[in-house]
Amino acid sequence: MSGPQSRRSGPVGVGIIGAGVISEQYLDNLTTFPDVRVVAIGDLFPEAAKARAAEYGVPVAGEVDVVLANDDVDIVVNLTIPQVHAEVGLAAIAAGKHVYNEKPIALDSDSAAQLLLAADQANLRVGAAPDTFLGAGAQAVRRAVVRGDIGVPQTALTLMQQPGPESWHPNPAFLFQRGAGPLFDIGPYYLTALIQLFGAVSEVAAISGKARAARVVGSGPRAGETFTVDVPTHISAGLGFADGRSATSIYSFDSPLKRTLFELTGTEATLGVPDPNDFGGDLLIRARDDEDWRILDSTRTISGRGTGVLDMARAIRENRPHRASGALAAHVLDIMVGAIDAAEHHQVVTLSSNVEPAELLPDDWDPHSATW
C-alpha cells in the first residue's frame, strides 16, 4: 500500500525512534542515500537522541513525539527494543506514517497481524528488518540458483553458534528476554534468506535448551552485573517448506566456538552461502566430483542496514511493492513462534501464513544514486 506521503516529491523523510547501538549502523547508511533524508531522531531518553543527532547532523531530536508529530517524516524507522516494536509501530501508523520495524516485527503473531491490518486500513506500509537479503551476497546466491548452478535446490543446512552477546554488548539483558535469544535475534537473517530460496515454510519441529539461568555483563559501565536468562539459548529446528523441500537450522548462544554455516544443496552441487547477517561475501560451490570448494562469486558490500528502508522509500515513490515487507517479517515471526511452541510441546507445528520470495533487485540497482 502507498500512503498519502507518496504524493510528495524529493527525498523521502525518515524519522528514527530509538537511539541505541543499532541506530549507528542505520544512520551510517541512511545519511548516505540521496533518495532519503533523516529529519528527526526520538528516544525515551531525549539526551541520547540529541547526542546521536549531533553525531550525524540530523536537524531535530528529542522525545518520541518529535518524530511522530513531524510533518516531514514519511517513514518511521522503529529501532526500539523488541518488546515495544508492535506498540511503537501502531503509534507510527496512528500518526499517519509508514513504519519500518527492526526485527522481530512483533513478539507474537496476533500483534503482527494487528499492525499489518492497521496499516492496510490507513493505506500505509509496514516494512521490517532484516534487509540483508537485499545485499550483494544474497542476491548473487539467488541468481546462482536461478541459473541452475547447483541443479534443482533440495535442502539447506544453517548453523549459528557463539557464546552470546553479553561479552561485548553494554546492555545485553534484553537480548535474553522474550522476543530475543538466538532464535529471535539471529534467526530472522537465516529464515528470511531461506524464504527467498525455498518460499514459505509450512511446518516446523524443534528442540530447545538453556545452558545457564543467569549471565554476566562483560563490558561497559554495567560490567559485572548479573541478569536473568528468560528464553531458550539453543534451538535446533527442522523446517518443512510448502513445496516439500526442507532445512535444518541451529541457533545457539551456548557455544564457546563461534561458527556460522549456510549450505544449499542441489541435485548437482552444494552452494556455500555468505553469512546472512552480512551484506556481501564469497559464494562457494562444490559439485558432485569436486575434491574441494571453489569460489563461484565474490561480492562486496555496497550498503548495509537501512537498505530495506531505502527500497521501501523508492517503492512508495514508484507505487510498487517494497521487498522487506511486513508480510515477510510476519511469516518469519510465525516460524519462530512455531519453533518455540514445537519445542515446548514436543510436536510438529503447522503454519497457516504464506509469503512469496521478494523480487530480485535490478542488475543496475545503486543505493547511492538519486532516482528522482
Image: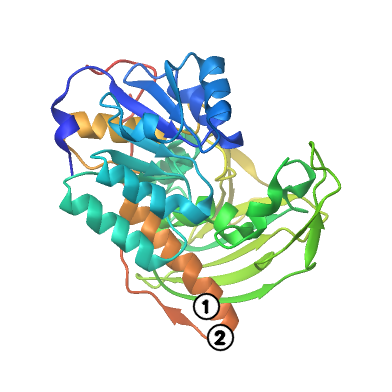
- Where residue 341 appears, as percent x and y from the top left, is 52, 78
Identity of the residue drawn at 58% across and 35% down: 20
- Where residue 85 appears, as percent x and y from the top left, is 44, 51
- Count residues near mark 1 (Cα–Cα under 10 Å), then give few for <14, some for 14-19, many for 20+: some
- Where residue 277 appears, as percent x and y from the top left, is 57, 43
The residue nearer to you, when weighing 285 against 26, is 26
Which residue is tagged 1?
Answer: 341
The residue nearer to you, when weighing 275 against 156, is 275
Asked if residue 75 shows in the view, the reply is yes
- Where residue 282 appears, as percent x and y from the top left, is 59, 36
The residue nearer to you, when weighing 44 against 324, is 44
Asked if residue 355 shows in the view, the reply is no
Which residue is tagged 2?
Answer: 345
Q: Secondary structure at mark 1?
A: helix
Distance from Cα at disc 2 to Cα at disc 1: 6 Å
- Count residues near mark 2 (Cα–Cα under 10 Å), then give few for <14, some for 14-19, many for 20+: few
